Image (cartoon, rainbow, N blue to C red):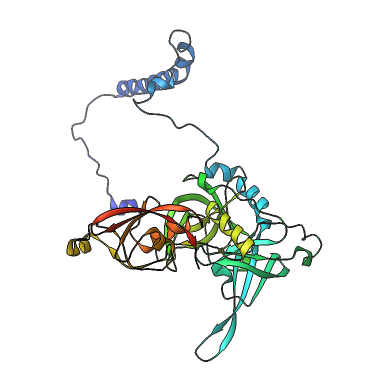
Amino acid sequence: MLNDMYQQQTYYDDTRRSGPNFGYKALTIVALVSALIGGILAAYIGPAYLFGRYLPWPNAQYNRQPGYQLPIGGGDSPADLAAAGVVAEVSAKVGPAVIGITNRFVVQSAFRAYENEAVGSGIIIDANGYIVTNNHVVADTRELTVTIAPGIETPATLVGRDPVTDLAVIKIDPKSLPDGYQNLTVAQFGDSDKLQIGELAVAIGNPLGLQFQRSTAAGVISGLDRDLQMEGVQLKLIQTDAAINSGNSGGALVDKNGYVIGINQAKIKLEGVEGMGFAIPSSAARPIIEQLIQNGKVVRPFLGVTIEGVVTPRVNAMHGLGTDYGLYIGAVSPLSPAAIAGIKSRDILIKLAGEEVHSFNEMQRVLFSKQVGEEIEAVVVRDRVAKTVRVKLAATP
C-alpha cells in the first residue's frame, strides 16, 4: 500500500486565532466561483464573440516555427495502401499465377542413395505453361511436380537453368489440368529499374511448403542494387522487409499495381537479423528468362584470361606495379578476345567497359552485363604504364 511507503506529515499551529473565521471562508468560496466563471467565459464565449467581429481569427501559418513545413497528407504510403485494400487486390490478382514446385531428387550418401524432395515457388509467365523459378529450387532434379491449386498437380519439365543468376524455367502442359484450371493466370512483369526505396512490396509464395501455399506478406522496398555473393557469384538484388522464408524461393515480389518487380530468392539467416529478404530484379531476369526459353541456357561473353591475383596498395608498394588495384593476368588463351585485343600475361586489368575492377567477381559482373559481339574498352597496366585496348566479346566456348 502507498501508506507503507510514504507517510504524510500533518503540521499543527499552536497559535489559535480567537473569534469566528466565517469571513475568510466566504471570501475563499467567492474567489473560486468567480475564477471558474471567468475561465468559462474566456474559453468558450469570448472567442465566439470577439474573433471575427473585433479581432481577426488566428491563422495557423502565423504560429509555425521558421523553416517548419507541415507534412502533406497523401494516400500512397505502404500503410495507406494496405489500409485501402491494395494488398488484398494485388494478392487476388497475382496469387493464382504463383504456384508450388516439388522437386524430387536423389541424394548419394557414403553408404547408400536415397530420394529426397524440396518445395519452392514459381511464377507462371506464359499461357502455354512456362514458369520461372530459382535454379536452386530445381537443381539436381529427378522429377518435378507443379501444384496449381490445393490438390491440383501436374508434372513439369525442365526447360533450362542458369546457376550464375540462380534462375530457371520449367514448363507444364495446361491441357493436362482439369477443366477450370487450363486457362492459366499469367503474371505481368514490371520495370524494376524505376523502383524507389520505401515503395510497397508484396511477397507471394509458399513458405515452409504447400501447407502455406500462396501466403502473402507486405512490406517495403528496403534497398536497391544490394551486392550479395552466392556460390561465388556476385549478384545485385532488391532488398525488402516483406517476409521471405524457405519455400518462398522463386515466388513473386509485386508492386502496388500488381506487376512482378522481383523474383524472391533468399533471406539472411543470422541470429538477431530479421526482415532482410532479397529478390532478383525483374529487369535483370527478363533477358535471362528469354534466353532460357529460346536456347535452354544462357550464352555469355568471355575475355579469355586467367587471373592469378588481386593487386592492392600493399602489393603495389612491395613490387612497384604502377597501380594500387586491379587483377593480375597470369595467362591469356590463344585466339581469345583478350589475345586478339593485344592483352598479354603479366598485364594488370584495372578497367573494363569504363568500370574499375577490384575483384574477379566485379570483372565477371561487368562481362555478364554485356552481349556477345559487343565491343568494349579494357584498360591494362603494363610495365607501370596504363594502356587502353578495344575488346570484341565472343561467346564462351
**Apparent side of residue 192 relative to residue 30 in the rendered image (left or right):** right
Residue at image point 51% right, 47% down: 193
Closer to the camera in the image, 365 or 154: 365
- Residue 372 is situated, as x and y percent measured from the top left of the image, at 51, 57
- Image height of 113 relative to 13, above or below: below
Q: Residue furthest top?
A: 54
- Residue 118 is situated, as x and y percent measured from the top left of the image, at 59, 73
Q: Residue furthest bottom?
A: 111
- Residue 9 is situated, as x and y percent measured from the top left of the image, at 24, 44
| Residue 385 falls in image quadrant | bottom left
Task: Decide if residue 276 is in sight here.
Answer: no
- Residue 15 is situated, as x and y percent measured from the top left of the image, at 18, 32
Residue at image point 46% right, 13% down: 51
Closer to the camera in the image, 263 or 23: 263
Closer to the camera in the image, 62 or 356: 356
**Apparent side of residue 47 relative to residue 188 in the rendered image (left or right):** left
Residue at image point 72% right, 57% down: 127
**Apparent side of residue 322 relative to residue 300 in the rendered image (left or right):** left
| Residue 226 falls in image quadrant | bottom left
Task: Decide if residue 346 is in sight here.
Answer: yes
Count of all numbered marks drawn on residues in the image = 0
- Image height of 277 relative to 65, above or below: below
The N terminus: image quadrant:
bottom left
**Apparent side of residue 34 relative to residue 148 in the rendered image (left or right):** left
- Image height of 160 relative to 241, above or below: below
Q: Residue furthest right?
A: 179
